[in-house]
Image (cartoon, rainbow, N blue to C red):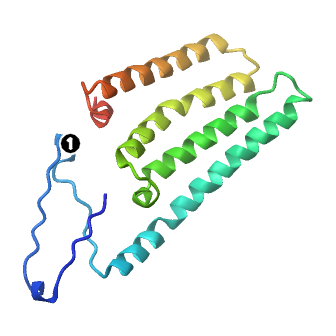
Amino acid sequence: HFVLVPLETADSGKEIVITYQTSLDECAGTLTCPVFGTEADVMVWLFLSYFWQIVSALLIFVVGIVFMVLSIAVRYNHKHNQGLCYLGIFSITMAVWILCQSNMRVFYCRNLNTANLMTYVALMVAPIPLLMFMNDLMKYRYQKILNIAIIVCLANMAISLIVTLTGLVDLIELVWI
């Protein structure tokens, strides 16, 4: 989260004190390096600093869409081949994670709490299509083991979201457990 603090010429030479509060002990005392300049300078710095992160996320998203379109085309020839679709879902999930994790999200997300929640949800969902892709790739030889791993991922996601949405534990605190 970025906070722009306007400084006047009368503030020149004075000490700037930044006071903030967090409910998470793990994040206490964490503050990124302040950036000084005009508002336009700060916006240009942000754009140049995180531009390639956004471009890479968008490319991964497009690759995921291409994989899913190709899986539809391939499905007509090979009825049981779902691997490209699973790989496409994994790519899209990782692109969502990168976009929600980016410091530029303040410009394209209205609700930062939702973006933060989506970061963790994307990380919890990501192994599922990857495990399904591995299952398809190995011709279902290890289906029992991979299905158990998928069920564990789903249970982890369900428990984490229930605990978070009921307010018992903040989602970021689950990361530290």
Q: Measured from the top left, where is residue 127 in percent x and y?
A: 55, 30
Count residues near mark 1 (Cα–Cα under 10 Å), then give few for <14, some for 14-19, many for 20+.
Answer: few
Tag 1's secondary structure? helix
40 up-or-down from 128: above or below: below
Query: Which residue lies at the image location 46% right of the left edge and 48% below the top edge?
Result: 100
Q: Which residue is mark 1?
A: 26
Query: Which residue lies at the image location 63% right of the left edge and 42% below the top edge?
Result: 91
Residue sitting farthest toward the left: 14
Quadrant of the rendering where the C terminus is positioned:
top left
Query: Which residue lies at the image location 39% right of the left edge and 39% below the top edge?
Result: 117
Q: Nearer the viewer, residue 108 or 98?
A: 108
Which amino acid type is shown beneath numbered disc 1?
Answer: Glu
Query: Which residue lies at the image location 57% right of the left edge and 54% below the top edge?
Result: 57
Q: Viewed as shown, does residue 167 lie left or right of 9?
A: right
34 up-or-down from 37: above or below: above
Q: Measured from the top left, where is residue 43 in percent x and y?
A: 40, 73
Q: Nearer the viewer, residue 142 or 17?
A: 17
Q: Viewed as shown, does residue 56 lie left or right of 158?
A: right
Residue sitting farthest toward the right: 77
Q: Viewed as shown, does residue 82 lie left or right of 112?
A: right
118 up-or-down from 98: above or below: above
